[in-house]
Image (cartoon, rainbow, N blue to C red):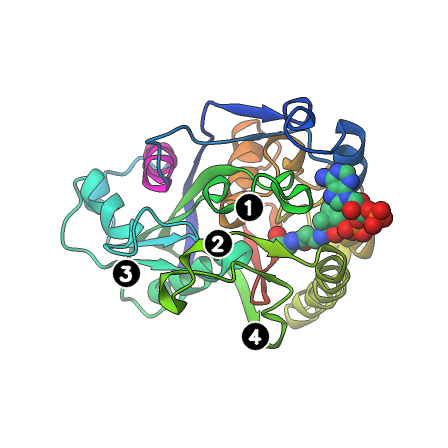
Amino acid sequence: MPASCILGTGSYLPERVVTNADLETMIDTTDAWIRERTGIEKRHVVVDGETCCDLAEKASRNALDAAGLQASDIDLILVATTTPDQFFPSTACLLQHRLDAHGCPAFDLQAVCAGFVYALDVADKYIRCGAARHVLVVGAETFSRVLDWTDRSTCVLFGDGAGAVVLGAGDQPGIISSRIYADGAYKDLLQIPGGHGNGRPDEAFVEMKGNEVFRFAVTKLWRLVDETLAANGLSRSDIDWLIPHQANLRIIQATARKLDLPMERVVVTVHEHGNTSSASIPLAFDQAVRDGRIQRGQTLLMEAFGGGFTWGSTLIKY
Ligand code: UT7
């Protein structure tokens, strides 16, 4: 059975930056509060006319270049996003057109902040069963468009961006294990309550009971890390790099403590772009690949937690 190997990574952040100091002029907040509670220093935000597909396209082209492949080599396109350009066509179809790649299946996958690990799980299964040889997996978001910019409890947390990987069928280990979960019983703790679907389009902004989400996230991620290691017969010391979802530095530190990993072995980018939802893991992954921290042959653990609740992990031999 073929394995899903990482052939290339790419990412893109919009040029416009909103710092904590900028937010101080807009809402009742302080740079000190945001840094202490979240670790975030700034976030990138799209400008008028710039869309999720624009970010996805740039990240995808970077990943294809890194993989040494053309868009026509791709036989499945998956875009994890909660903030698509339109209801339909899917952002994956829009992206396929931009890349001038025609005919292969292309679809969006919505699991909020766990979207990228969900999409990796789907891609891995396509590759393992022989249905695809080269899969483009993208996490792309424009969360700035679904924020209430007067709500200080949420608008300071999120940013826009995109990350992508090209997976290829190979005989190297690649994705060793993938675990995804959901529990809709917690739907009210982190949500965008309104939308055209329920006739409440005016309420299409993020709402979060931050404290409760924080507690659940830490508990679920600790259990997830234990399960992932046990299921693969690994011990904590076998993990070279933790690439966590970048929501809050304190959650990341708690997961690293659970793994006994020093923070030097954790890829942290949350200070640079805040929570970019499904884009956060591929953004962090690409940064650490390009700056040479992550090396071939190393064992990587990705983990994410998001609205739904959804959560999951991907274990990779890079
Ligand atoms: O990506 C999906 C998963 N999402 C997450 O994992 C996010 C999980 N939650 C969190 O990261 C944290 O709960 C937050 C960063 C959202 C909030 O941090 P916290 O330490 O849980 O703060 P809190 O919500 O308990 O609020 C503490 C205080 C409150 O004031 P009072 O009631 O104590 O007077 C808030 O009104 O901080 C106040 N506050 C703020 N103050 C300044 C809330 N937001 C702000 C703000 N600036 N932006």
Q: Residue at x 54, y 43 (%)?
A: 276
Rate crowding at label 3 as few (under 14), some (14 to 19) or many (20 or more) other CA atoms within 10 Å: many
Label drawn at residue 267: none
Residue beneath disc 4: 184
x and y, in percent, of residue 293 in the image: 62, 32
Label 4: how many residues lie within 10 Å, few (<14), some (14-19) or many (20+)?
A: few
Evaluate if marks 2 and 1 touch, with contact meaning CB atoms under 8 Å apart.
yes
* Depth check, front residue: 97 or 291: 97
Q: Amino acid at mark 3?
A: Ala
Residue for badge 3: 132
Find the magenta span and give its range: 52-66
For the point 23% across and 41% down, which residue is it? Answer: 71
Residue at 27% from the left image edge and 38% from the top image edge: 69
Q: Which residue is mark 1?
A: 281
What is the chief secondary structure element of the magenta stretch?
helix
Marks 3/1 in contact by CB < 8 Å: the verdict is: no
Q: Amino acid at mark 1?
A: Ile
At label 4, the amino acid type is Gly
Place of residue 226 in the rendered image (x, y in percent of width and height, measured from the top left): 73, 66
